[in-house]
Amino acid sequence: MESEIKNSFKSVVGAEYVKDSKAQLFAYSYDATANFQALPDLVLSPKNTEEVQEIVKICDKEQIPIVPRGSGTNLAAGTVPTKGGIVLLFNNMNKILELDKENLTVTVQPGVITQDLSIYVEQNGLFYPPDPSSMKISTIGGNVSENSGGLRGLKYGVTKDYVKALTLVTPDGGIVKLGGKLAKDVAGYDLMSLLIGGEGTLGIITEITLKLIPLPAVKKTGIAYFNSLEDAAKTVSAIISNRIIPVTLEFMDKGTIGAVEDFMKIGLPREAEAMLLMEQDGNKEQVDEDIRQMIAIAEEMGATSAILAASEKEAASLKAGRRVALSALSRKRPTTILEDATVPRSEIAKMVRAIQDIALKYDVEISTFGHAGDGNLHPTCLTDIRDREEMDRVERALDEIFHIAIELGGTITGEHGVGEMKAPYLEWKLGASGMNLMRSIKQSIDPKNIMNPGKIFAKETKKRLVIHNGQ
Amino acid sequence: MESEIKNSFKSVVGAEYVKDSKAQLFAYSYDATANFQALPDLVLSPKNTEEVQEIVKICDKEQIPIVPRGSGTNLAAGTVPTKGGIVLLFNNMNKILELDKENLTVTVQPGVITQDLSIYVEQNGLFYPPDPSSMKISTIGGNVSENSGGLRGLKYGVTKDYVKALTLVTPDGGIVKLGGKLAKDVAGYDLMSLLIGGEGTLGIITEITLKLIPLPAVKKTGIAYFNSLEDAAKTVSAIISNRIIPVTLEFMDKGTIGAVEDFMKIGLPREAEAMLLMEQDGNKEQVDEDIRQMIAIAEEMGATSAILAASEKEAASLKAGRRVALSALSRKRPTTILEDATVPRSEIAKMVRAIQDIALKYDVEISTFGHAGDGNLHPTCLTDIRDREEMDRVERALDEIFHIAIELGGTITGEHGVGEMKAPYLEWKLGASGMNLMRSIKQSIDPKNIMNPGKIFAKETKKRLVIHNGQ
C-alpha cells in the first residue's frame, strides 16, 4: 500500500489507532480456522460510524479490500484478510449505548463482548438468549455478521431473531439506518436479515439494537448417558415429539466425553457412547414438569443413567464441560478442524453414525458434539496440518460429511458461516440458481467487491464425491 | 395480449384454469384497498411448481407482468395488477402436503387458507402462531409474501419467524429451494427473509415449510376499560416493564368500541375512552399469575374496570369483537381506509393522541385499534371516495400520521406491506441510501421488472409535510 494512502487512513483514525508493524499485521493474518492465513496491509481501529464511513470511502475510491473483525473466533476463515487490504477492528467501538426497559431493547456498538452484554442485561432482569460457545470473547458485531447460534438456539432461536435495528455503512460510503425498536416492520425488503449472516460482504455494521426478553425465573439441568448413539438420538426426537422444547439439548459422543473428562476431571463416565445435557428454563412448575418428563423419556429410550443435576454447581460444571468440548479435544493433536454440519433433528442418529463410519473409512480421528435439539452437529477432526497425506484424508472425510448432511436435508453450516473455507461447498447446498441469486445481490450492493472479498463466493465449486450405498 | 400468447398460457395450465372474460378480469382488478384498480389481461390457476415455472418463462420472454394473488385481502394495493398482465391464483395449489411431528414442521402449497392450517395443526396438538385478522380467508402464500403479523405477534412474532423452507420460481424461470427443516442454517445470504415480505416482486413462491411449536396448555383473557388513552398506554408499558409478555395486548379507542358494540351487541361500554384486551397462554400457573398481575397493573394505572373474562365464551366474544373491528367500522361510511402506522410501544399514547388531533385538524373521522403491545396501530379512516374534497383532507391527514410515526421512531407499515399505496412514502422511512439498496436488489433479481411491477418502488416519493410543533 502506498504511503500516501496509508497516511489518509491515519488521518481519519489518528496514528495511535493504526497498526502496521510486521508483528501486528501477522497477528491479524489468521483467525480460529486452521490452515488459512493472509497478511493485511493495515489494521485500523475507528472510534465511530463517521470514521468507518471515511475509511470505506477511501477503500471505495482506491478499491482496497476491507475486512471487519471482532475477536477473530471465526471457524470458517471468514475474518482472514484473504485479499490483503484493511482489517477493521472494533476495540474502540465497544460501548453499551442504551438499555431501554420500556421497549425491551439494548443498543450497542459492534465491539461489545457477548458475555459482557449477557451479564449486563441479566443484572437488569432481562435476557439476551444467543450464546455462542465463544461468547466469553466473541463480539456482538461478529455474532450479527455471522448470525451466530449457540446452545440455547432450540428454544430461543439465533442472533437474527434478536436484531431490531442496524446502522450500516454501505460499500460506497453511505450510511443507512435499518429497522427500529419495533415489533413489526414490513417497509420494503428485509435488508437487515440480508446483513445478518452476511459475513461482512455487504457493508460494515456500526451500531446494533437488540431485542431482550424477560429473564426466566428458574433453570434446571438433567443429564443422561447412553450405551448407543441411536438411543440418545431417539431420546432427542421423543422429547420434541412430546412437545417439550428445552432450552438446551446438547450431545457429546464417546470421544468428546473422554477428552472433556481428561481436561476437566468432573466424573464423566468414559465408557458411555453418548451423553445428553438437557436444560429447561421458565417458571418453576413448567421446568419441574419438563425435566421430569425428559428424564423419564431418556430412561424409556434406554439411558444407562438419567438424573437431575444435584445442585446448581453440578449443573454449572456439566455445562462448562460441554462448553470446553472444543478446547478439550484440541489438546489431543496439533490441529483441530471443527465442523458444523446440520441436519433435521430426525436425522441426527444417521448423521452421527455416518460421521463415525467416515472416520473409520479414511482413518482419521473425528469426535462429535453439538446442539442435538437443533440437529446442529460439530464433528471435530483432530489432525496435524504438517502431515500432507493425513490432511488429504481429512479433507476427503469432511467432503463426504457435507455431502451426507445435504443428502439428509441438511446444510453445510448451521452457525459458523461460509467464509473462505466453506465457499467451495456452498453450491452443493444452493444449486446454480441459488448461487446466481446470491452473486447478483453481492454484485448489486458491492460492485467493486471491496467488502470482505474472497468469502462466501468461491472461484470454483468443489466436485461432489460419488457416494456409494452403504458407505 | 395477443391471442397467440394467450394460447401458450392456456396450453400450460389447461383452458379450464384460465379466466379471461370481462367479468372475470374485473373481479381480479382490485383487492381490499379502496381507490386502486387495474384490469389484468389474464387470470391463471396453475396446479404445481412446474406450471408456474412455464408461466414465468413465457412472462420473461414476452416481458409480461405477473402478479401472484392469494385471497386479495391486501390493504396496500399489493395484489392489484397495476401494469396489467397475468394475475396468478393459487386456488389449485391449496394442499397441506406434510405434517412432520418429529421436526415440528408443516409443508403446504401457497393457497392453503391460514385458518384451515391453524385448525389442522391444533388438532395435532401443535401451534402455528401468526394470526392476521384476515386469517379466515387469507392464504399462507399471501401471508409469507406480506410477512403478515396478527394479534399474537408480541409474544410469538410474525410470519417470518415461522418460515423454514421455500420453493421459489425466479423471474427468469429457475427453481430454487431455500432453507430446510433446520433450526440453524447460515449457508450464504438469508434469501428467504428477502422473499418473505417481498410482496411478490422477487419471484413466485410455490411451496412453504413452516415451523410449528407445541400448543400452549391454557389460555386466559382479561379486559380493562379506561377513561383516558394515556392510562391505557401506561398500562401497556407497565405490563412489559414488569417483564410480562402476553400473547395479545389489543387496543380499541372510543370510536372503535362504539362501532363494535353497534355491530356485535356484546355489552361494551360506549363511554370508555379506551379498552385493552389482555390474553396470556402457557402453563396454568404462569397464565394465572400473569393475568392476575396484568389486571392489577391496569387497576393501578387507573382503569375504570379490569376483570378476568368470566368464561371461555365471554373471552371468545371479546376477541371476536376485536377481530371484527374493521368490519364494524366499515359499515359506517362508504369507504374505509385502514392504516398501519407502527411505533415503539413506549410511544403509543403520543401516537394515538396525535391521530386524534390530526382527525380534528383535517375534520375527518378516524378511529384507532390495533396491537398495542407491538406498537402496531390501525388508524381507520371512514370516508367516501366520491367526495374529492373530503378525500383530499383524508390524504393529508394520513400523510401527517405517517410523518409522525416516523418522527417517533416508527414505520409506515407494520404488517400490511407497501404495495402500490404506500410506495410514495417508503423513502420517508428508508432514506435515499436505503431506497438505493432495495432498488439495486430488485434490479439484480428481476432486471425486466416483470414481478408485480409498480409495487414497493414508486416513480416519485411524496413530499413530506412540514409539521409545526404542537400540531
Image: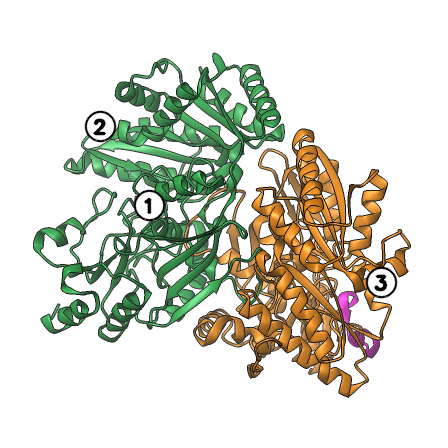
Chain colours: A orange, B green
Tell me the residue at 34%/41% (across/down): B399
Tell me the residue at 72%/83% (across/down): A393
Residue carrying label 3: A259
Q: Observer-nearest residue: A305 or A107?
A: A305
Q: Position of residue B79 (x, y in %)?
A: 27, 52
Residue carrying label 2: B331
Callout 3: helix, strand or loop? helix
Does residue B291 appear to the left or right of B401 in the view shown? right
Callout 1: helix, strand or loop? loop
Indicate the chain on which mark 2 is placed.
B
Res A350 visible: yes
Q: Observer-nearest residue: A17 or A43?
A: A43
Indicate the chain on which mark 3 is placed.
A
Does residue A29 appear to the left or right of B184 in the view shown? right
Q: Are marks 2 and 1 on the same chain?
A: yes
Indicate the chain on which mark 1 is placed.
B
In the rendered image, residue B143 lying in the magenta stretch gets the answer: no
Q: Looking at the rendering, which quadrant does residue A455 occupy?
A: bottom right
Tell me if mark 2 has few (under 14), some (14-19) or many (20+) residues whose alpha carbon lies within 10 angstroms of its own: some
Does residue A188 appear to the left or right of B302 in the view shown? left
What are the residue bounds of the magenta stretch? A15-26
Callout 2: helix, strand or loop? loop
Whole-number angstrom distance, CA of label 1 to CA of label 3: 52 Å
Q: Looking at the rendering, which quadrant does residue B133 occupy?
A: top left
- Amino acid marked by disc 3: Ala
- Amino acid marked by disc 2: Arg
Magenta part, dominant SS: helix
- Amino acid marked by disc 1: Ile
